[in-house]
Amino acid sequence: MFHRSIALAAAAAAGSLLATSLISAPTTTAAATTTQAALPASLVVDAGGASAEITTAPFGLAFRDASGNEVLDSVPGEGGPTLSLHLSDLLGTLGDTDVVPSRYAPITFTTGNVVMIQEPQFPSVTANPFLNLSAGMTYSLTDVLASTRLDDGGVRLTVATDDPTGRRAIVEVRPDKGDAVRTRVQFRPATGIAFVGAGFTSGEDEAFHGFGGRRNAIDQAGESFFNWIEQTIFDVPVLGGQPQTGWYQQAQFVSSRPYGFFLEQSELSRWRMRSDRDDAWQVQSNSPGLRFTVAPGAAPEAIRTLTAITGRTPVPPRWQVAPIFAQTLSGGTTGKSPEDYEAEIRASIAKIDELDLPYQAFSFEAWWLLQRIGKLDDIIALIKSHGMHPIVYFRAWAGNDGQGLEDDAAFATAKAEGYGATRAKRFAVRLLRHPRPPQARGAARLHQPGDRGVVARPGARGARRGG
């Protein structure tokens, strides 16, 4: 009954949202545009070990490797402007649902509204998305009207759209760092745009590995999901969340075709990885523009190319990639005592010694329980005395939620100094981390959905935002 009520409420809200979105949305067919006769049928951007071919009438993109093999191609655009209505809920009652099938084209944009209802103050799942609704009209780019060759060999294009208001797109396709091509899409005017997307051809042979740490699978082929960092460790429906969620997400993946794809957006992004069509995939960003990089090549090569752009995690010491024992907090939500948890740790260490197991590190989650009874330092010393590195669970933000995982004084400082997010659509949170050497400044930045990872190195493009 509860799920049914939520579904009915969602349907009512969606109807209201769609009506609001369409008040100012024209329903007439788009006027025909004229392609400049002087433009060639296609333009090529050479990036060394990668290249892009842009068709001009209609607009399209194709990416090739060093041998000229096509690895990624825009999906052909079909039809005209269409209604857009999408629902996504945390409960899984509605799932991730396109009430109206999504429009596919090389580049699309949706004018309308997006509403996200988040969990109110609730233990463990505060701010999880409870319901996401988006509605409006979806348009696409049509023909290239003008092109300018840039100094780096890239091109800047003025492209018509089938938006009857006469809106135009400015598209830049340029060599990126290494063997990669970067595409940037902006609009004139950019007002009223809720999502901008790109669609590409695919098939059953293509796997999509990446997207950071997900709970459902390594290959996201056939899945539809938002990029949203979410607390979803419960089986209870009201708390459970969708299967593709996770704590460490990235807006990038490696395809088996092969190429790497990186969406350079920190805004909420939606991915349809051959979920609603057998022959295509699509990404959309909740922003007035779009930026993405394509790096042709097999996984090792594509990963090298993309991480040269985004920044690489330092090579870990050997013990961090050796066997690590994890003493989780099983049963902790049902009232496990600190003394019981301490006994579990001591028993595990004794069993490791008895069996002569090759663990080089010992991770224990509920360090705060040990701290309550004054045993934290003793357990750390015990782990070290058995030749293992102690690892504790911590969260990389300031908080005062009463769980004892953060320092209340640090939270008060962060609040007083204005380190937290202050705008409704600003997902990034700046962290307080002292002391830090000068060369590390600017590197302690936590990203919410679709940014370049958890930590952006100084000079990486992860600091950029918007379209």
Image (tube, helix red, strand yellow):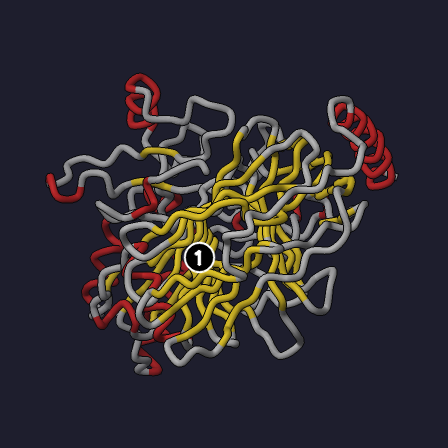
Point out residue 278 in the picture as x, y percentages from the top left corner.
72, 69
Depicted 372 relative to depicted 252: above or below: above
**Which image quarter holds the N terminus?**
top right
Name the residue at 63% across, 44% down. Answer: 34
Depicted 456 relative to depicted 48: above or below: above
In-front residue for pair 442/29: 29
Would residue 298 appear left or right of 236 to someone viewing this image?
left
Q: Amino acid at mark 1?
A: Phe
- Farthest residue, direction left: 438
Point out residue 427 in the picture as x, y percentages from the top left corner.
46, 34
Depicted 377 relative to depicted 360: above or below: above
Count the labels in the image: 1
In-front residue for pair 435/196: 196
The local crowd at label 1, few if under 14, some if 14 to 19, many if 20 or more residues have their Cα within 10 Å, is many
Would residue 28 appear left or right of 243 to someone viewing this image?
right
Residue 358 visible (yes or no): yes
Residue picked out by circle 1: 262
In-front residue for pair 185/228: 185
Depicted 7 relative to depicted 280: above or below: above
Point out residue 392 in the picture as x, y percentages from the top left corner.
32, 53
Point out residue 454 in the picture as x, y percentages from the top left corner.
36, 48
In-front residue for pair 329/263: 263
- Farthest residue, direction top: 416
Name the residue at 61% across, 27% down. Answer: 192
Identify the secondary structure beneath mark 1. Answer: strand
Name the residue at 47% across, 67% down. Answer: 63
Would residue 87 appear left or right of 126 to someone viewing this image?
right
